Amino acid sequence: MLGKTYDSQVCSIARALELVGERWSLLIVRDALFAGTTRYVEFQRRLRIATNILQSRLDGFVAAGIMERRTRSSAAGPEYLLTDKGRDLAPVLVALTQWGDRWAAPDGPPICYTHETCGSTAGVEITCAKCGALPDADEVIIRPGPGMPAEYLQRMAAARAAY
């Protein structure tokens, strides 16, 4: 069984999963991004999520800087608004939707992301930062980045030397 943290993983995917990898998390962000949902009662009504789970996720998003809580003098309760960090999850949601449309939507896409300005379909693709090419996944390799701890680099070098 997986724990709640991935301390042994030196991986940005693992770190991101600590923040948004729980079942309801991306659905909350989806509704905030694309449905304009901002109030606790709206999230609860749209998602039909248990109140304790919803409050825990919203509090976690606020603590992680994904959302900010704004309290107004309204009886409707505070608003939960996405920060830039939260809005930066949009391509993740679009990519996950594209995968779901291909592999988990037998009757076709239930929703389509559309560029409001021109009306064309919006999507996410892997592109090369230098030449703009669209490589296949098998053409993408990994290399250590600047955030790779020195001890991992040493282990990787030792493992290569052993082969």
Image: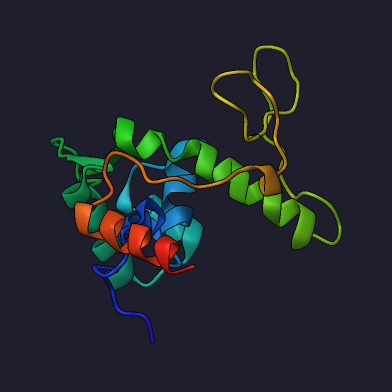
Q: Is residue 42 left or right of residue 73?
A: right
Q: Is residue 59 left or right of residue 1?
A: left
Depth check, front residue: 34 or 89: 89
Report the residue at 67% width, 33% height from top.
123
Count of numbered marks: 0
Q: Residue furthest top?
A: 117
* Colour scheme in use: rainbow
Depth check, front residue: 53 or 115: 115
Report the residue at 48% width, 55% height from top.
27
Q: Is residue 144 left or right of residue 118?
A: left
Question: Residue 10: horizontal and vertical position, in percent?
Answer: 31, 59
User: From the viewer's perspective, is residue 122 above or below residue 44?
Assistant: above
Report the residue at 84% width, 52% height from top.
108
Question: Residue 124: horizontal and vertical position, in percent?
Answer: 63, 35
Question: Residue 99: horizontal and vertical position, in percent?
Answer: 69, 52
Q: Residue furthest bottom?
A: 1
Report the residue at 45% width, 45% height from top.
143
Q: Is residue 59 visible?
A: no
Q: Is residue 155 visible?
A: yes
Q: Quadrant of the N terminus?
A: bottom left
User: From the viewer's perspective, is residue 148 above or below residue 129?
Assistant: below
Question: Residue 19: horizontal and vertical position, in percent?
Answer: 31, 56
Depth check, front residue: 132 or 89: 132
User: From the viewer's perspective, is residue 42 above or below residue 67?
Assistant: below
